[in-house]
Amino acid sequence: MRKLITGVAIVMAATFPAIGMAQADPVKVGMITTLSGGGAGLGIDVRDGFMLAVKQSGNKDVEVVIEDDQRKPDVAVQLADKMIQSDKVDVLTGIIWSNLAMAVVPAVVQQGKFYLSPNAGPSALAGKGCNKNYFNVAWQNDNLHEAAGAYATNKGYKNSFILAPNYPAGKDALTGYKRYYKGDLAGEVYTKLGQTDYAAEIAQIRASGADSVFFFLPGGMGIAFMKQYSQSGVDIPVIGPAFSFDQGILGAIGEAALGVINTSQWSKDIDNPTNKAFVESFQAEYGRLPSLYASQGFDTANLLLSAMEKASVKDADAFRAALEEADYKSTRGDFKFNTNHHPIQDIYVREVVKDGDVITNKIIGVALKDHGDAYAAECSM
């Protein structure tokens, strides 16, 4: 059953009968995510994927306290303090945005709590700033952009125009693209975070002589850019990460996205039993197709549940070792942690297509196989 508290705080206590579960100490999870304003859809999907996994597990020893960070770093910090000091959570999760993660995660892990990231993976937490209690279940920020750069190089593009918002994940995005892209740059632009008018940037692209455009503009930023780009008449191929072409985003962009190439570590058409069951059950539970954010929430919860089967969260060393094993069935298929607790996984190339009346993504290849991140060598735990 679910117990709801009015306001921005929601407490969801999983009280379903245990099914074949080993007895374990209860774990209290604090989920801080974006549930209102710009980017709310991302946080809602992470939350719903996480809670679906908890429900399906039948584990009655998980309690999840969920709060809305409103996409504000100061609010996220206050919520983390409250969850640790007042709610006495054992594990924290949920943050979507890298600037919020940088404000919250270092203090959380320094207090001996575990943080499982279902999304944000800033480079500062993957390299020298890594921590034994920090695990990223999604990616390191550069990864999908590195795959886009590899695709552009393999496609033969020689002169890319690249743009992203001016915040940690945006900087990681362009750094990642340039790491694997071997051509020249027609332009490199950092936009304002939350920007919705891209007339000036599109004019720059038109005049640049570019043979390709790579952009990272998550949420409403990407929707606005793609609609304006399509209307502009500029006919230069677009490449992006899945963040800007995920299922929830495609519904808002519409046919302007058709034919765009994007890179992702997850797709609804990955052919394995866990993913097929996840897509079907998520759609049945929530009445919509899952996004990659939903898959990341689902995988994060299943990682936590797998550790709970092997160790008590009160024994930090044993619980950490259980997390490191990543002994669970991922929606992505093969998945393991690198030495810096970030994923090693395949990253796919997808094309936006129309399947009946639905605009969606179709896997057309693998951009990078068993791919880790560039910062693991800097991590010494």
Image (spheres, rainbow, N blue to C red):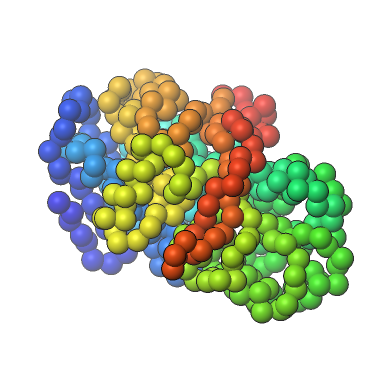
| Position of 229 relative to 214 (above/below) | below
Camera-nearest residue between 26 and 254: 254
Residue 377 left/right relative to 203: left
Query: Is 161 situated left or right of 380 in this image?
Result: right
Across and down, in percent, residue 188 comes to 79, 59
* Nearest to the observer: residue 188 or residue 158: 158
| Farthest front residue in view | 356
| Residue 329, quarter of picture | top left
Q: Which image quarter is the C terminus in?
A: top right
Q: Is residue 109 visible?
A: no
Decide which of 39, 233 is in the foreground and name it.
Answer: 233
What's the residue at 59%, 66% (across, down)? Answer: 257
How many marks the image carries: the answer is 0
Q: Let me know if residue 251 appears in the view.
A: yes
Image location of residue 63, percent across then percent down:
24, 44
Residue drawn at 54 percent across, 60 percent down: 353
Which residue is more in the foreground, 99 or 285?
A: 285
Give left or right: position of 1 versus 296: left
Q: Residue at x 85, y 52 (%)?
A: 158
At a point 26% along the width and 55% down the height, the residue shown is 285
Q: Measured from the top left, where is residue 317 in percent x and y? A: 40, 21
Residue 233, placed above or below residue 344? below
The quadrant holding residue 213 is bottom right
Image position, residue 351 (x, y; %): 59, 55
Q: Quadrant of residue 326?
A: top left
